[in-house]
Amino acid sequence: MVDIAPGGQVGIAQIGVTGLAVMGRNLARNFARNGFTVAVHNRSWEKTASLVAEHGDEGTFVPSESVADFVASLERPRKVVVMVKAGAATDAVIDELVPFLEEGDIVVDAGNAHFPDTVRRENALRAKGLHFVGSGVSGGEEGALLGPSIMPGGTRESYESLGPILEKIAAKVDGVPCCTYVGPDGAGHFVKMVHNGIEYADMQLIAEAYDLLKQGLGASASEIGQIFAEWNTGDLESFLIEITADVLQHVDAATGSAFVDIVLDQAEQKGTGRWTVQNGLDLGVPITGIAEATFARALSGGVPQREAARGVLPAATTPWEITDRDAFVEDVRLALYASKVVAYSQGFDQIAAASQQFGWDIDRGAMARIWRGGCIIRARFLNRITEAYERAPQLPLLLADEYFAGAVGNGVAAWRRIVAGAALHGVPTPAFSSSLAYYDGVRAERLPAALIQAQRDFFGAHTYRRTDRDGSFHTLWSGDRTEQDA
Ligand code: NBP
C-alpha cells in the first residue's frame, strides 16, 4: 500500500479524471505534464495512490478517495473525464457523479462507448442541465500519455471551455492539434467507431499485402519487413506500415524464428469493427473494406470450419511464377494504396450518411486532419483527404476527388493483376478483391441492379422505375404482361 493521503482540497483542479487504469492514468499524467492541476479518482484507492506515488513529480495531482471529494476538488464549471470500462461501468460512474454536479458542469466519457449509448446519456444529462461529451480517444496507452487524437462530441458550448484543455494534450501535426469539435451528442464516439473500422480495413489490407509477398515471392518475414520499411518512405507512410516493418523484422527470442511465424493465426476483436459494419448496414452504406476485414478476422477464428476445409477443399492452382520481383512488389504496393483509398472513401461516406441522418454536420476534412497524429491510422495521405474536402466540402465520393482518382487510376492495372493473380493462385485477398469490385461497381455506366429490380417486380410486385420516363411501374407478369403505373 502506497502512503499517499487523499487531499480534501476544494475547487483547485482544472480537470478531473476518474478511472485510472492504463488509459485514465496516462491521460491524467498527460494533463499534469501540460501544466493542468488534475483531480484524480478511481473506484479502488490503490490505483489513485500508485499514480500519485509513481508520477506525482510530473505535475500537480489532487487525489480523492470519495466521489464527493473528487467533485469538490474541481473548479467550476467542473470538467470530469470518465475513463472506465465501456458499458455498465460508465453508467455506474455517471450515476455516482451526477448528484454532486451542478448546472453547466461537463462530464466527458473518453472510453470506447457505442454511440447510441452516448446519445442516450447526453439526453439524460442535458435534462439535468449538465453537458455530456462523448469523446473518442485514439492512440492506445502511449497516445494517452504523449498526445492522442481526440474526437469530442456534445454541445458546442461545452467545447468552449473543454476544447482548449483537450487541444493542449492532443497530438500535434505541423503545430495543429489533433482535436476538434466533432458534432452534437454521439458524433464524437461515432467518428471514433468509424476510425476503428478503418483501422480494421487498413490492418487487413496490410496483412493481405504481406501474404501476397510471402506466397508470391516466397520471401521471408524479415525481407518483407524491409519492403514495408521502404514503402514507409512514400505515399503509404503511416504508423501501421511502420509497425508492420518493425514486427516483421522482430525475431522470437525463444525459438529464433521470425516472430510473426510463431503467432497463432487467429485474429481477435473487441467489437468496434462489428459496430461499424452493423451501422453501415443500418445506413445502407457499402463499407465493404471494413466489412471484409471484420469477417476475415471471424474466418481466421473459425477453427472448426478451417479444420473441416483444410486438405479437403481442392485448390486447383498452379505455382505463382514471378519473373520480375521488383515489378511484383510495385504492383502489390499500388494495389494496397488503391484498396486503402477505397476503404477510407467508404468510411468517409459512412460519416457523411450518419451526419445527415442525425443532423451532426460533421466536417469530414477536419476529421482527416485530427487523424494525422496520435491515432492508430495516422498517415501521410490524410493530408490529401483534408485537401480534397477543402476543395469540395460536400464531395460525394472521396475516391472521385481529382487527386485520388488520379492516384488510384495510376494503379488500377497493377491492382487488377494482383487480384487476378491472387485468385488464380489461391491467395485469399478479401479486402483487396472487394475494394476492386467496389471501384468497378461505383464507376460502372450501368449495373445489373436493373435485373434485380425486374426480378423483384416479378415475384413481389415491388415496382420499378424506367430509364426513359419518370414514375413507378409494375408489369402484370402472371397476366397479359402489360405495364401499369404503380
Ligand atoms: P478498462 O477498460 O480495463 O477499465 C478499468 C477501469 O474501469 C478501472 O479504473 C476500474 O476501476 C473501472 N471500473 C470498472 Br471495470 N467498473 C467500474 C464501476 N462499476 N465503477 C467504477 N469504476 C469501474 O481500462 P482501460 O484499458 O484503461 O480503458 C478505459 C477506456 O478506454 C475503455 O472504455 C476502453 O475501451 C478505452 N480505450 C482503451 C484503449 C486501450 O488501448 N486500452 C484505447 C482507447 C480507448 P477499478 O480499478 O476499481 O477496478
Image (spheres, rainbow, N blue to C red):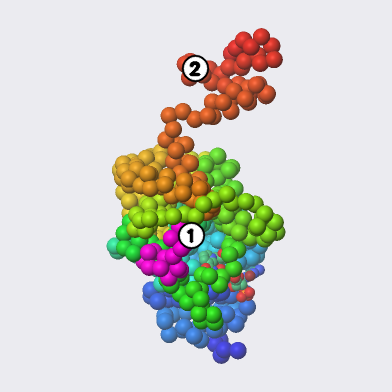
Residue 14's mark? none
Picture coordinates of residue 49, whole percent (x, y): 55, 83
Picture coordinates of residue 103, whole percent (x, y): 53, 59
Q: Tell me the crowding category of disc 1: few under 14, some 14 to 19, or many 20 or more residues within 10 angstroms, Cα based.
A: some
* Label 2, ligand 1: CB separation under 8 Å: no
State the SS at label 2.
loop
Residue at image coords 48%, 19%:
467
Q: Which residues are magenta?
A: 214-229
Q: Tell me the crowding category of disc 2: few under 14, some 14 to 19, or many 20 or more residues within 10 angstroms, Cα based.
A: few
Picture coordinates of residue 405, whole percent (x, y): 34, 42
**Where 262 sits versus 124, above or below?**
below
Residue at image coords 60%, 12%:
483
Please report whichever mark, 1 or 2, sits nearer to the chain's N-terminal start.
1
- Mark 2 lies on residue: 470
Q: Is residue 225 magenta?
A: yes
State the SS at label 1.
helix
